[in-house]
């Protein structure tokens, strides 16, 4: 299985001048230690000379003990100071069952993330815990979940199998956001949980209407080997 850490480590060896990624993920770094890791990438099909700087934040898992509001506010402040062209939020804003109570409600942490700022905006996808922590969504097999509702209320668009076309320095590019791949827990087989996803990779990429480069946002990086070679 590809994890967010191994995926970023893998793309980090491709050093160049195309895309700059500054990323922070709770759970990757030791508890209470905030660090920023920078990757410089030159994808094979990236336009020559086009520089784009992205700040990536994943797995906040808001919780009153392990990730309180003050800590999230610190992450927002550091991220805003990176000078990124856009900020990408890659899901799992809710704390999981392993954290138990006291979790932080979406209406409390979302306005803090709403203070993120970048010239080309802040953009988000959802993670599995944003679905798993909502019994009604699990029962009905549909959303919207509170993470999406509160992020959008805070002014942050959430992409579930959707795209947006942006432009920097006259060069267009696409942000594509995939819905979560293991959103629903459907049962247990041989001691392992079975999941159902909401992701539609083909349908998402079909929304791209020209040959401008595409950046795919997804919570679970396992999807990337399935991306058609023409998009890589």
Image (cartoon, rainbow, N blue to C red):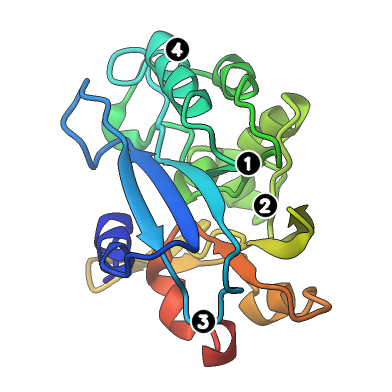
Residues under labels 4 and 3: Cα distance?
A: 37 Å
| Label 4 vs label 3, nearer the camera | 3
- Judging by the rendered image, the residue that carries numbered circle 1 is 136
Check the image and report above or below for 5 versus 22: below
Q: Which residue shows up at 44% across the image and 70% down it?
A: 42
Quickly name the residue at label 2: 140
Q: Which mark is residue 121?
A: none
* Residue 69, horizontal then vertical, whole percent: 45, 12
Choose mark 1 or mark 3, whichever is in front.
3
Q: CA distance from mark 1 to mark 3?
A: 37 Å
CB under 8 Å between discs 4 and 3 = no
How far apart in space, not on screen, are marks 3 and 2 (Cα)? 35 Å
Secondary structure category for the residue under label 2: helix
Decide if residue 165 is on the left or right side of residue 140: right
Mark 2 or 4, closer to the camera: 4
Crowd class of label 3 (few under 14; some 14 to 19; many from 20; radius 10 Å): some
- Residue at image position (57%, 48%) is 126
Disc 4 element: helix
Q: Quadrant of the N terminus?
A: bottom left
Q: Which residue is outermost to the right?
A: 209
- The residue located at (22%, 20%) in the rendering is 32
Q: Is residue 161 visible?
A: no
Q: Nearer the viewer, residue 190 or 92?
A: 92
Few, some or many residues within 10 Å of mark 2 (<14, 14–19, 20+): few
Is disc 3 placed on a helix, strand or loop?
Answer: loop
Asked if disc 1 and disc 3 are in contact, CB closer than 8 Å, the reply is no
Q: Is residue 172 left or right of residue 71?
A: right
Find disc 3 in the rendering and name its residue: 232
Residue most extreme to the front:
49
Q: Which residue is mark 4?
A: 69
Q: Earlier in the sequence, mark 2 or mark 4?
A: 4
- Between 40 and 136, the one lying in front of the other is 40
């Amino acid at each position: 299985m590809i994890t967010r850490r191994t995926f970023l480590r893998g793309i980090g060896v491709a050093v160049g001048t195309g895309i700059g990624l500054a990323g922070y993920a709770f759970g990757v770094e030791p508890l209470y230690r905030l660090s920023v890791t920078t990757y410089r990438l030159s994808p094979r099909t990236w336009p020559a000379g086009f520089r784009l700087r992205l700040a990536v934040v994943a797995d906040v898992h808001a919780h009153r003990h392990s990730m309180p509001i003050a800590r999230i506010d610190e992450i927002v402040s550091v991220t805003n100071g990176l000078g990124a062209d856009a900020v990408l939020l890659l899901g799992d804003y809710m704390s999981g069952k392993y954290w138990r109570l006291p979790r932080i409600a979406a209406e409390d942490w979302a306005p803090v993330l709403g203070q993120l700022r970048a010239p080309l905006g802040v953009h988000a996808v959802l993670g599995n815990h944003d679905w798993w922590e909502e019994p009604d969504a699990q029962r009905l097999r549909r959303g919207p979940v509170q993470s999406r509702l509160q992020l959008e209320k805070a002014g942050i668009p959430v992409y579930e199998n959707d795209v947006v076309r942006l432009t920097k320095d006259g060069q267009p590019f696409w942000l594509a956001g995939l819905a979560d791949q293991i959103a629903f827990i459907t049962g247990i087989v041989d001691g392992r949980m079975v999941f159902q996803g909401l992701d539609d990779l083909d349908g998402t990429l079909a929304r791209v209407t020209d040959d401008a480069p595409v950046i795919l946002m997804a919570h679970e990086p396992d999807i990337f080997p399935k991306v058609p070679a023409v998009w890589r």
